[in-house]
Image (spheres, rainbow, N blue to C red):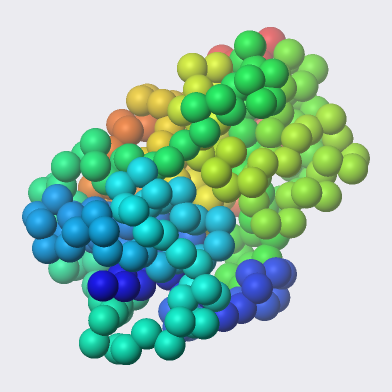
Amino acid sequence: MYIISGKHYNKGIIGDDSSALDGYYELGWECGLSNVYIKSLLYNNKIKRSDTIVTREGREFFYTSLFDNVITWQDFCKLNVDPSETIHILDKKHEEIDYYDVDVDLVCDFDLDKNVEKKYAINDKFMIYCIRLRDHCSWRNSDIEVAKNSIIKFIDNGYKVFVVGQGSQILENILPVKYLELRDYSSLISSKYCSFVISPLSGIIHVANFTARKGLRTLIFDHAGERHVDNHPMLMGNCINYKNLDITFIRGIETEEQIQKHLGDFLK
C-alpha cells in the first residue's frame, strides 16, 4: 500500500507554491497533520511498516525510522500505481484526529542525525533563527532587518547562530551564520546546547513540537493574530506540544524590543 503524506508538484521556490494541497503540501500541514495521522494508524495496526510512505523531497526523515519504504512524490508519479493501492491522507481534517490519543514516542520518532553536533562543531551555546521569505501568505514573512540586527547582538553575546527556512541562505553572505537544511535543523533543536529559537508562526517551527529538546525556549511571532485558539494543531496548538516547549506567542511582527524583552535573560 502507498500512503500519500505529501504532494509536491511545485518546486517550493519563492512565489511558486499555493494553498492548493494537491500541488504543494505545506510543511506545517504535513508535520502536524499527516505525520501524526500516519503514525497513529501504525500504532493502531491499520497500516504496516512495510507500506510505502510518499512525501515531498527533504521530508523523508519524518518516516524513515518507522517505515521500510519512503519515497518522494516525484518518484511515486513515475510508478503508475493503481488508485486502489493508495491511501490519501491529504484530505484528512484535523478535527478527525485525536492528538492526545497517540503514542508520543512513536509520533516523535523522526530519523534525526545523531552526529549533527560533530558535523557543525557544536560544543557551546547556540540559537536558531527561523526565517520565512515567500510571496505566498506574505504576512507571515520575517522582518529581515530585525533578524539581522538581532543576530548580530546574539553573536556579540557569544552565541553561534544558525538560520533555517526557504530563502534564508542569503544571510550566509552578509553575516557569520550557518544555513541549515530541514533535517539538520530538526536534529540540532534536540541539542542540549540549543538555547532558544525565534520564528514567525510558520511551518518550520512546527517541527520543534516533535524533535526539539524538552522545554526548549521558543519565541513565536504571530504576525496576523491567527492563533486565536490554543488547541488548533496547525497553529502550534497545545495539543501537539509533545516536547513541552517553553513557548511565548507574540501577536504582531517581530521587533528588536520584543526580542530583548522576552529573551533578555540570554543577553548581557
Q: Quadrant of residue 148?
A: top right
Residue found at x 36% / y 25%: 214
Is 181 on the left-hand or right-hand side of 99? right
Q: Who's the residue at 89% across and 43% down the image?
A: 173
Residue 45, quarter of the rendered image: bottom left
| Residue 16 on image: x %, y % | 67, 77
Which picture quadrant has residue 126? top right
In the drawing, does residue 13 fall left or right of residue 170?
left
The residue at the point 58 percent across, 28 percent down is: 116
Q: Position of residue 252 (x, y in %)?
A: 55, 52
Give the number of callouts. Answer: 0
In screen coordinates, is 214 left or right of 153?
left
Choose between 96 and 51: the one closer to the eye: 51
Front-most of residues 232 and 8:
8
Residue 120 vertical position relative to residue 60 in the rendered view, above or below: above
Q: Position of residue 248 (x, y in %)?
A: 43, 36
The image quadrant where one finds the C terminus is top right
Coordinates of residue 211 in the picture (x, y in percent): 41, 37
Regarding residue 261, the answer to whether it shows in the image is no
Residue 185 showing in the rendered view: yes
**21 shown above or below 118:** below
**Looking at this view, is 157 or 211 the one in front?**
211
Quarter of the picture holding the N terminus? bottom left
Is residue 19 shown left or right of residue 101?
right
Q: Residue at x 31, y 70 (%)?
A: 3
